[in-house]
């Protein structure tokens, strides 16, 4: 009996070779997406973690400064604490190599760590400067730098070469003193080591430190943490490295959850294919099932057989998916790292972190979901009476009210989806929003059978062409399998549609916001990539010089730093409120007299917070915020909330004069210039650039900056579109599988139709019309579901995860194009099954066995 049962599986997989291959490939694609996204997320966090712990893998306590750093004398006080084994001072900043003026996306940001290169570092890999160097004098006194092999190869450098770069707006030249071997583990390839004295000079931080890495006796760590907090200067904080890594994890949490949701959709579509494949196998193998039942096979054995078949498909797809995922990870890691650099924090893409847990999770998930997808058809196979199975070869068992009952269940799912949207986020994660999305997908899928039934009825009634009428009848005859194919395509179209609506709405909202906020004529910033990886600054004299250039009416200066707040990282922006009073560029919410607000808050400890910040931290007008500053812990009062789309982590806006007084930092990050009326902007740009030579700056006009905003926006969502296109491809594989199986199942019916006079081209057209029905219904259902999911994404998930206020804009052209693409793609998918149907030999098809 066991041999017969194994033969049933082998026969199913052998006779349905095309369907088996298509299903395995679809599952492999879904597993590959899940693995690639997991590896990309892991690599992004690991890259930041390696930059945190790059100096010493055994560091278990760090002192971090806020803003420009803290006094280096804190190092001596820390070294005297009991329990501190070693304390290493660190300067941490960025340089830009390969940047050109007017090319904001060119160049590479390299993380510079200034350490004492002559001292052995407390790390397992030893001193990063170990090996052949030019000389110790060059390393310490000649601006020597230790770079990775990747950087050396990418920029054509060797030992003794000069690394030309920009530190802020200032050109700097470092001598390559050593090149790290790629065998040195745990060091991100984007990190450059210099001596700490060199770093202090290059970044104008003489007498200051950004960080102190300490190795503390583990048995005394708790008491040392307490003691260190008592001796460090105001504005610095003491923590364990894992706390800092946890902060970046929480910053990236929403972004990574959205990518995980994308990969989950691909897995769901793959589950539909597994379900369809096993369900078709149940229908086609009913005679064999009946024979086995008559010979004594139990229902449990039949159930196990088809469950094993689903697991076998999942196993094969998962194995292939791991290989495909490894290839796809190369793209996804780069895309995710670039997005993180653009929007969140500077990290190097580095090499892929092959996380064993991520690989095992993707493998097990592929098999588990395949087994789950096979449960329903396996139960159906086990419950069918033996006599019925032996005389019902090739026909789907029908239920008179299946479509209606399924639609009622779908309506219930939609109601649940609406109810759960009222649930609050859990730890910043829109759990109930994601649950609502699952219920919308389930509800839409359950309504598909009724949609197919109605389409079949209307087709038979109104279509006059015989092949088209037959196609409409076939559509309703195999209701469950057609429903699965249509549902899989609908879900893929729905996700693509919903994201298109979200992105279109977001883009329109951001462009409208940029038109109001970016109202200056010219914008000045240091040369280099314009994203979160750059931390370049101008000295205050640059602002003064530009303000006195003929043709400049007035300027706004902005200073941005990253600060911790309630266990998360957020932005603190400083701009002179007196400047804003003259030319307000901020969208305040619910403030009737903005001029009066700015006038009364200038120079005070009053702040404004962005809507994402207010949403993320539950802050409202009138609340008090306590921030650690170089002048101690200071309480600020929230006077207003403003609309902003530049930072998901939120922004605290502080008056510039207050910031300079409290944070002891008079540098600026960017400068907005308003020209005098009728000024020639090209001439003014030239005068500004010449006024601050030899410093190098990048300057953009209003139109150029708007174009850059849209370019960054599109680049951010490129990986989203790529993943959804793969999901659509998986769904179309399901259409091929379903139509091919139905053609084989209808061999006898097709043979009879041929005897009755139906021509070969009519058979081909019948199958193609059926494919067109599947594409059209999938497109209609997908667009409808996509609209519901878009509302959920914009008004629930986005609000809870990011706090952005997005206005709904429907891209009607895209929706129309999506429908057309769904129909055309389904027709293309039906070409091969139609050809197979047309080649069926009549005599063989109707021969009685």
Image (cartoon, rainbow, N blue to C red):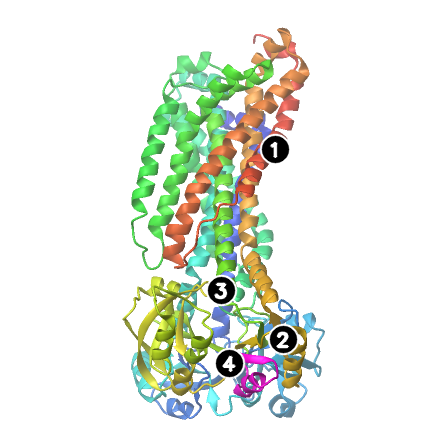
Q: Which mark is residue 509?
A: none
Note whether 595 is above or below 86 in the view shown: above
Q: Nearer the viewer, mark 3 or mark 1?
A: 3
In terms of sequence position, does the residue under pointer 2 or pointer 4 come before the other? 4
In the foreground, 60 or 680: 680
Note whether 839 is above or below 101 in the view shown: above
Q: Is residue 758 left or right of residue 360?
A: right
Q: Give the quarter of the figure containing the N terminus.
A: top left
Note whether 657 is above or below 477 in the view shown: below
Q: Nearer the viewer, mark 2 or mark 4?
A: 2
Q: Which mark is residue 824?
A: 1
- Near mark 1 (Cα within 10 A), the count class, few <14, some 14-19 or many ≥20, is some
Q: CA distance from mark 4 to mark 3?
A: 22 Å
Whole-percent x and y of residue 88? 46, 85
Report the residue marked by disc 4.
668
Q: Which mark is residue 679?
A: 2
Residue 546, magenta (yes or no): yes
In the foreground, 23 or 631: 631
In terms of sequence position, does the residue under pointer 3 or pointer 2 come before the other? 3
Quarter occupied by residue 480:
top left
In terms of sequence position, does the residue under pointer 3 or pointer 1 come before the other? 3
Q: Secondary structure at mark 1?
A: helix
Q: Secondary structure at mark 4?
A: loop
- Range of magenta residues: 538-555
Q: Are marks 3 and 2 in contact (CB under 8 Å)?
A: no
In terms of sequence position, does the residue under pointer 4 or pointer 1 come before the other? 4
In terms of sequence position, does the residue under pointer 4 or pointer 3 come before the other? 3
Q: CA distance from mark 3 to mark 1?
A: 42 Å
Whole-percent x and y of residue 551? 61, 80
Determine the residue positioned at 59% across, 55% down.
Answer: 331
Q: CA distance from mark 3 to mark 2?
A: 21 Å
């Amino acid at each position: 009996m066991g041999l017969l049962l194994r033969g049933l599986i082998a026969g199913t997989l052998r006779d349905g070779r095309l369907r088996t291959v298509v299903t395995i490939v679809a599952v492999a694609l879904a597993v590959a997406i899940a693995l690639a996204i997991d590896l990309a997320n892991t690599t992004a966090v690991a890259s930041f973690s390696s930059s945190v712990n790059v100096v010493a893998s055994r560091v278990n306590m760090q002192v971090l400064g806020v803003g420009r750093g803290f006094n280096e004398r804190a190092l001596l006080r820390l070294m005297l604490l009991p329990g501190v084994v070693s304390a290493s001072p660190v300067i941490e900043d960025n340089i830009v190599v390969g940047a050109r003026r007017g090319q904001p996306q060119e160049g590479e940001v390299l993380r510079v760590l200034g350490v004492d290169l002559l001292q052995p570092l407390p790390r397992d890999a030893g001193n990063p400067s170990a090996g052949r160097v030019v000389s110790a004098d060059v390393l310490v006194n000649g601006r020597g730098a230790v770079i990775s092999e990747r950087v050396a190869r990418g920029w054509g450098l060797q030992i003794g070469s000069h690394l030309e770069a920009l530190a802020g707006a200032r050109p700097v030249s470092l001598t390559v003193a050593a090149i790290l071997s790629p065998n040195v583990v745990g060091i991100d390839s984007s990190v450059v080591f210099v001596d700490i004295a060199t770093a202090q000079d290059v970044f104008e931080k003489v007498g200051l430190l950004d960080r102190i890495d300490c190795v503390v006796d583990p048995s005394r760590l708790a008491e040392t943490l307490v003691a260190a907090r008592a001796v460090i200067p105001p504005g610095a904080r003491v923590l364990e490295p894992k706390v800092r890594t946890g902060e970046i994890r929480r910053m990236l949490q929403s972004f990574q959850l959205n990518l995980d949701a994308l990969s989950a959709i691909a897995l769901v579509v793959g589950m539909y294919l597994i379900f369809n494949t096993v369900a078709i196998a149940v229908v086609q193998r009913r005679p064999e099932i009946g024979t086995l039942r008559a010979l004594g096979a139990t229902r449990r054995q039949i159930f196990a057989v088809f469950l094993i078949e689903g697991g076998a498909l999942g196993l094969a797809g998962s194995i292939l998916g791991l290989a495909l995922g490894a290839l796809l990870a190369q793209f996804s890691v780069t895309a995710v790292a670039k997005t993180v650099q653009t929007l969140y924090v500077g990290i190097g893409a580095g090499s892929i972190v092959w996380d064993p847990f991520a690989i095992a999770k993707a493998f097990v998930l592929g098999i588990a979901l395949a087994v789950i997808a096979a449960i329903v058809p396996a139960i159906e196979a086990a419950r069918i009476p033996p006599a019925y199975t032996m005389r019902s070869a090739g026909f789907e068992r029908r239920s008179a009210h299946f479509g209606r009952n399924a639609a009622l269940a779908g309506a219930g799912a939609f109601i649940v989806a609406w109810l759960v949207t009222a649930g609050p986020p859990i730890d910043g994660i829109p759990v109930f929003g994601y649950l609502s999305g699952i219920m919308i997908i389930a509800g839409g899928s359950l309504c598909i059978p009724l949609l197919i039934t109605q389409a079949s009825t209307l087709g038979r009634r109104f279509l006059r062409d015989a092949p088209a009428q037959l196609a409409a009848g076939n559509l309703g005859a195999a209701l469950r399998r057609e429903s699965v194919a249509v549902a899989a395509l609908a879900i893929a179209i729905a996700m693509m549609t919903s994201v298109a609506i979200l992105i279109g709405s977001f883009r329109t909202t951001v462009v409208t916001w940029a038109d109001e906020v970016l109202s200056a004529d010219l914008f000045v910033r240091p040369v280099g990539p314009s994203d979160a990886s750059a931390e370049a600054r101008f000295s205050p004299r640059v602002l003064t010089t530009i303000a006195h250039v003929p043709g400049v009416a007035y300027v706004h200066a902005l200073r941005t730093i990253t600060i911790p707040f309630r266990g998360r990282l957020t932005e603190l922006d400083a701009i002179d409120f007196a400047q804003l009073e003259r030319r307000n560029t901020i969208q305040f919410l619910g403030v009737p007299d903005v001029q009066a607000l700015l006038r009364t808050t200038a120079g005070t400890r009053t702040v404004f917070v962005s809507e994402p910040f207010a949403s993320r931290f539950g802050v409202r007008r009138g609340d008090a915020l306590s921030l650690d500053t170089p002048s101690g812990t200071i309480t600020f009062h929230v006077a207003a909330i403003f609309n902003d789309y530049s930072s998901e982590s939120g922004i605290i806006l502080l008056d510039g004069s207050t910031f300079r007084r409290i944070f002891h930092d008079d540098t600026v990050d960017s400068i907005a210039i308003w020209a005098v009326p009728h000024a020639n902007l090209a001439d003014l740009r030239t005068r500004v650039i010449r006024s601050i030579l030899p410093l190098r700056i990048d300057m953009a006009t209003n139109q150029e900056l708007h174009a850059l905003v849209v370019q960054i926006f599109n680049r951010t969502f490129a990986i989203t579109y790529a993943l959804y296109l793969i999901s659509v491809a998986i769904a179309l594989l399901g259409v091929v599988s379903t139509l091919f199986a139905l053609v084989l199942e209808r061999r006898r019916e097709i043979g009879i139709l041929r005897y009755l006079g139906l021509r070969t081209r009519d058979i081909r057209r019948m199958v193609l019309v059926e494919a067109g029905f599947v594409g059209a219904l999938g497109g209609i259902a997908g667009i409808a579901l996509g609209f519901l999911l878009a509302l959920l994404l914009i008004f629930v998930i986005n609000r809870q995860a990011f706090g952005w206020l997005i206005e709904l804009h429907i891209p009607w052209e895209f929706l129309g194009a999506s429908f057309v693409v769904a129909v055309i793609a389904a027709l293309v998918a039906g070409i091969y099954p139609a050809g197979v149907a047309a080649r069926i030999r009549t005599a063989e098809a109707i021969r009685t066995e």
